[in-house]
Image (spheres, grey):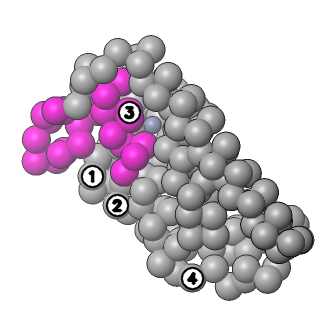
């Protein structure tokens, strides 16, 4: 499912308590990069390996998600620094690499897991196996509710902690 905001839910939930320990920009970049292949399929009718009509190809496997995670990490760090500068938060630069890698790989693997539940054509263990153990684990409605709830909860925790910090600094 190309570029759906629903994938941001688990990242926002982690961002809430972790604050500067998680890069939501890198996480978001991972969501966009991993869905370039489905977008390519929609445009050309074939996946990256040339399989016609296979929406979730190599990018939506453990192998592909690992590769995309590396790319998201490498590109995510300068993008995160740019974002922090724009937001006037330059005191957090440089963001440690461990924060970037955690955000990038949590991004691609959580994306893969969510898509594997929702889409029958996701094959996490390809090219070794076509088995998708997660498909249909919960209904699509439940999955969307989960993504919405994690996003909402993460937002409340994030701003709650920010507010508490401001109060404790002010007192
Ligand atoms: Zn996807």
Label 1 neighbourhood size at 10 Å, few (<14), some (14-19), many (20+)? some
Q: Disc 2 and disc 3: Cα gap in Å?
A: 15 Å
Answer whether residue 122 is magenta in the image.
yes
Q: What stretch is highlighted in magenta?
A: 109-133
Provide residue 144's location: percent of width, then percent of height. 49, 23
Tag 1 or tag 3, which sits nearer the N-term?
1
Indicate the secondary structure of the residue bearing disc 3.
helix
Residue 145 in view in this figure: yes
In the rendered image, the vertical position of residue 144 relative to residue 64, given as above or below:
above
- Circles 3 and 1: CB distance less than 8 Å? no
Q: Image point 18% across, 32% down: which residue? A: 132
* Residue contact at pointers 2 and 1, CB within 8 angstroms: yes
Measure the alpha-carbon separation of dots 3 and 4.
Answer: 29 Å
Q: With 22 as the anchor, is 89 left or right in this view? A: right
Q: Which residue is drawn at 37% across and 51% down?
A: 109
Say above or below: 27 vs 115: below
Residue at label 4? 96
Q: Name the residue under label 3.
A: 115
Give the quadrant of residue 139: top left
Residue 62 shows which numbered tag?
A: 1
| Disc nearest the viewer among 1 and 4 | 4
């Amino acid at each position: 499912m190309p570029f759906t905001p629903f994938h941001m839910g688990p990242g926002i939930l982690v961002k809430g308590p972790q604050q500067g320990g998680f890069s939501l920009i890198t996480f978001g970049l991972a969501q966009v990069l991993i869905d370039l292949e489905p977008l390519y399929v929609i445009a050309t009718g074939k996946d990256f390996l040339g399989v016609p009509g296979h929406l979730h190809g190599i990018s939506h496997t453990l192998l592909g998600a690992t590769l995309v995670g590396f790319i998201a990490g490498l590109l995510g760090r300068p993008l995160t620094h740019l974002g922090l500068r724009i937001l006037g938060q330059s005191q957090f630069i440089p963001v440690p690499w461990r924060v970037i890698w955690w955000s990038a790989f949590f991004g691609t693997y959580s994306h893969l897991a969510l898509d594997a539940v929702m889409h029958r054509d996701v094959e996490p263990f390809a090219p070794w196996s076509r088995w998708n153990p997660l498909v249909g684990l919960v209904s699509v409605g439940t999955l969307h509710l989960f993504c919405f709830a994690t996003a909402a909860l993460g937002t409340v925790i994030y701003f709650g902690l920010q507010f508490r910090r401001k109060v404790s600094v002010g007192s």
